[in-house]
Amino acid sequence: MAKLRFEDQCLPVQPGESVLQTLLRSGTQVPHSCHRGLCHTCVLISPDPVPEHARESLTPLQRQQGAFLACCCYPEGDLRIHRPDTNGRQQARVTGKRLLNNNVVELSLEVRCRWRAGQNIILWRHKNLGRPYSIASDPARDGLIKLHIKRHAFGEVSRWVFDQVKQGDFLEVGTPEGHFYYDTDYSDAPLLLVGNGTGLAPLFGILQDALQNNHSGRIDLYAAAAKSDELYLVEELRKLRATYPQFRYHPVVTSGEALLEEGKQQDDLASLIRDRHRELRQTLIYLCGSASMIEAVSKTCFFNGAKRSHIMTDAFVSQESASSHSP
């Protein structure tokens, strides 16, 4: 039986347990969120060899530093582990907070760091509780990091943001990370942006970045929600559509409710993409939202000619889902 040596503790790993599960079972509080290796909240450090799967999605620098994802690490032998250096965390001042719809709030943060629209950043409520959110703003246009945060019934961070955080507060955030952002090398290629729920957040940032950089290729943005009142940024996107002839905005309602306004489509996203975008060989594709949507649309795009290297994905895991994995 493998053992974990962590902060003067020696913890036995039960069969089939990950490092994260062992720590939580023992009552040790460590940052975590999705339990699926998507959010990177549970990064820990080990000087010992760890299974490759626990490191494959990390950057070369993180791997060099011995970082690994605790939720994806199933030890094959004893491991010495410790928390990462928290010097990467920094103070952010809340400069704005506005409702985008009944369940989504936009939080504007003044942070002294570099970022790209579409990257993610961890918002910390306290030392061991943080959640990753995508950046919905372009630094050249806004100068502020803007996050779209959906309120979840069991979301400790989202409920805190909705109920307690106010303008002028100082919060702690991590370092912006990720490669889900606009690539200026494709300034004349067609762009296909597809998201559901708050998957719109990084797509909106990428759209602004592309337009700011005079992207000349056609841009199609599909933003989906189950009901029409769950769509948001509709007016802002319509104004961009009216201003930039290369941009097309497609709001999508997937619940089958009656059409309320011109432009909304009653269909699932994969079917719409299949029927409307039959030739995707030269198209750069960004997909963000639920894992099931991303899987379906990725498959559709591939069968319609898209190169796998041209399909960028960013899957979200809801706090309800994350909570169901907690011990």
Image: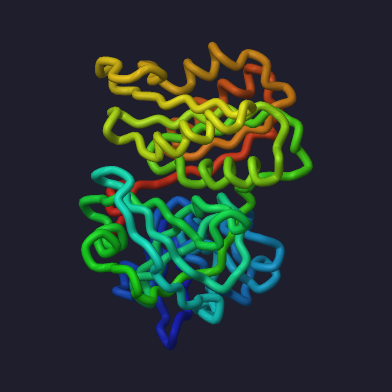
Q: Nearer the viewer, residue 76 or 158?
A: 158
Count of number-bearing discs: 0
At x 60% / y 17%, what residue is drawn? 277
Q: Nearer the viewer, residue 320 or 99?
A: 99
Among all residues in the image, which is located at the extreme front?
243
Residue 15, quarter of the rendered image: bottom left
Can you give x and y, in whole percent of width and height, for residue 324 in the image?
27, 50
At x 63% / y 72%, what residue is drawn? 66
The image shows residue 100, relative to residue 32, as above or below, that is above
The image shows residue 119, relative to residue 163, as above or below, that is above
The colouring scheme, among rainbow, by chain, secondary structure or one colour, is rainbow
Q: Nearer the viewer, residue 94 or 223?
A: 94
Can you give x and y, in whole percent of width and height, for residue 296 in the image?
49, 26
Question: Is residue 106 found left or right of 50 in the rendered image?
Answer: left
Question: Is residue 59 found left or right of 7 in the rendered image?
Answer: right
Residue 230, quarter of the rendered image: top left
Q: Nearer the viewer, residue 297 or 272?
A: 272
Can I make out residue 319 in this image? Answer: no
Question: Is residue 13 found left or right of 321 in the rendered image?
Answer: right
Identify the image quadrant of the N terminus. Answer: bottom left
Can you give x and y, in whole percent of width and height, for residue 75 in the image?
52, 63
Among all residues in the image, which is located at the extreme bottom?
8
Identify the image quadrant of the C terminus. Answer: bottom left
At x 63% / y 23%, what residue is drawn? 302
Can I make out residue 138 in this image? Answer: yes
The image shows residue 281, relative to residue 105, as above or below, that is above
Residue 183, quarter of the rendered image: top right
Among all residues in the image, which is located at the extreme right?
185
Can you give x and y, in whole percent of width and height, for residue 248 in the image?
55, 26
At x 54% / y 57%, what residue is drawn? 142
